[in-house]
Amino acid sequence: MKVIHLIGGGDIGGAKVHVLSLVKQLNSQIEVKIISFRQGIFAEEAKELGLDVQVIRNNNILKDIRQTISLIKKNKYDLIHCHGAKGNVIGYFCKRATKLPTITTIHSDYKLDYMHSFLKKMTIGILNSFLLRRMDAHIAVTENFRNMLISRGFNANRIYPVCNGLDFKKPVHIAEKKDFLEKYHIKDEANHIYVGIVARLNPVKSIDTLIKAASLVKKANGNIKFLIAGEGDEAKNLKKLAATLDLNDTVYFLGWLKDPYELMSVLDISVLTSISEGFPYSLLEGAMFKLASISTDVGGISDLVEHDNNGYLFKPNDIASLVTYILDLSSDNEKRTLFGERLYQKALKDFSIEKMASLQLHAYSDVLSWVGKGKRSYDIILSGYYGFMNIGDDALLDSIINNLKHIESDIKILILSRNPVVTTKMIGVDSISRFNLFNIISTMKRSDLFIYGGGTLIQESSSTRSLLYYLGTMYLAKLLGLKTMLYANGIQMLKKRFNRLVTRYVMNKIDLITLREDTSLGLLESLNINRPRIVITADPAVTTYPCSDKRVYEIFKREGIPADGNYLGVCVREWKGHEKAYSKVLADFADYLFHHFAITTVFIPMQRKYIDDSILSKNIARQMKTPSFILSEYYTAEETMGIISKMNILLGVRLHSLIFAACCNVPPIALVYESKVSSFMEYIGLDRLIAGDVSDITLENLISVYTYIRENETDIKDKLSKQSTSLRIKAIENASLAIELKNKKGEKNES
């Protein structure tokens, strides 16, 4: 493989380190050449590293483009890799002329790159934004940048995460502190603490935040000194600000350092104050020296720095928090050592140069496998009740994709969604509208497997129209030659004769059906659906895991919920007018638990759009005589599961609230609104915890079930623990069967 990298050559920060270290590592496996469109530090360091670098600079961009195109054609490269605005501009024209696959690395938020210059922002900035969308694929150096691109409409399956990496095996120069400080005329004393930053001195780095913080720190502790390394347009203004704040004996400007390790080896604390970042190498360099770090929580920094575990994070321009963290670490040598060691271990594990190169090579190979073959093909089209802001279905979708990717990591998936933009941003996988028939047909023609993933899609309780939509798209997939699968679905009794006939006809043409419980098998048999292979598995949502305890308590704090209470979690939904009757019963039950057992109710709305569970939750709370909490935000499936894990019991109408509770060993009390709820409780052997139907629930029934739970809590939790393990194994089987079906030869029609 032969790859040519195009870069402006003026960057002396993270992009420079990324490209040079990446190319050096790649050279042992593929042939790589760098074109720099400027003489300077970048090209000089590339030559010192023994890299194949050539400077093309004719003081005329058209000549630069022509010379680069000629070079690419002459040397027969396989792929063009661009970096930065100038690299993208020239790379785009090279792509047009050579027809080669062309990718670009996103090192920063491209909309903020020229915030310091209105003229550049309105010229090169706009042009770069336009051309980025003409590239074949994008490399994102952080997960945040990947999400940023997705939120701006970039194709999710053409974005490859390649985190920055550092060569931890490379010997580094460790400066003598005394010599280094003397070099910059800094008086050294044994009790001095040195706080440092390495960054370009421009507005996006917000160095003024550090200087203003230094002014406040000086008043509290005059032994803390600040060392700022870097050059840039803001240097003059920043020095003036420091002088104005009387910091000449506290803040020291070191200028540009050819070797940043020189500074890192004398610091006690590494700081970053940027308002926008990709993934700064200065943090990795600090980690190499086991420095305690304080940074703004921007870009991909939180991928490395875990707040209050291996460093501190603060919001951009939050001077007060920065001051607090500097003073805290400066006064606690033990904490500095602990944070530094933890940061080093995480960086060593997740941000090595070897891992960065491996991810990059995978991206190259994958792009070469599909670029030039017309429109992008997909392995799987995934359809279901997606894009409706329903936590249960979000969990289904996320779990299905994670399980599929666990078996085949580079599988290409497309989702049919009610809200494609939100789904793509949330899940990170391509999505199109479930109602765009022409787009669906076009995509089906270049896909292998069509899946209905999770839920109860074969039902008529919502409407016949919904049933016909799902059956219709499944039948369309078969007509277009795709393999088809019903993935961990539940089946509901169909009463209308027409619906039964259509369902039988279509479902008997499906290749594979997996069911989330055995009750659905009987319903399939009653419909005479017997031609597909049928396997009983489990709901994919059982493979969702709760978020960290730390995140749960952050949510509790935000919602005003004490962390040490006893709680009844309540997940309700509207259903055919019955909510008015059962809401009073639930209110009385919640009051009963509070008065007799000091258990407080926490309402956990599972859907916020189209059906808003918070409305009914508020109505029940209003009828209560005791205090309660209602979650005010729409949380992720992992966060919701984490919240449920802190409940003593869970009273659920929605099926997935009961599934989450079961997987967290929280005894669930079920209210049945559809047969799928009772089917699940029977499947896990806890039908004794069904309190009744939403149409006829009584306070006596609820109290009876709760009393049973109190008397048999240990046995119930033991059963839940065993069942959740079994369910997870069965749920993963869904993905194995799907991949097996996808890879089965000779099934897709050739057209």
Image (cartoon, helix red, strand yellow):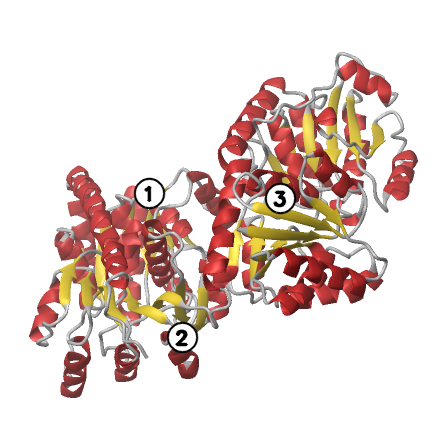
Percent coordinates x, y for residue 456 in the rendering = 25, 69
Q: Inspect the image, locate mark 1, and give the three-letter code of the amino acid beneath it.
A: Ala
CA gap between label 3 and label 2 equals 35 Å
Q: Is residue 392 left or right of residue 503?
A: right
Percent coordinates x, y for residue 9 in the rendering = 75, 48
361 vs 530: above or below:
above
Q: Is residue 151 left or right of residue 491?
A: right
- Report the residue marked by disc 3: 279
Q: Residue at x 59, y 67 (%)?
A: 99
Nearest to the observer: residue 271 or residue 211: 271
In the structure shown, which secondary structural element does the residue marked by tag 1 occupy?
A: loop
Q: Inspect the image, locate mark 2, and give the three-letter code of the amino acid beneath it.
A: Thr
CA gap between label 1 and label 3 equals 48 Å
- Report the residue marked by disc 1: 598
Residue 560 visible, this orientation = no
Q: Is residue 446 left or right of residue 7?
A: left
In the structure shown, which secondary structural element does the residue marked by tag 2 occupy?
A: helix
Q: Residue at x 74, y 35 (%)?
A: 198
- Report the residue marked by disc 2: 443
Percent coordinates x, y for residue 88 in the rendering = 68, 60
Callout 1–callout 3 Cβ contact below 8 Å: no
- State which tag comes first along the sequence, 3 or 2: 3
Counting other residues with Cα less than 10 Å from the Cα at mark 1, is it few (<14), some (14-19), or many (20 or more)? Answer: few
Q: Residue 379, labelled with which disc?
A: none
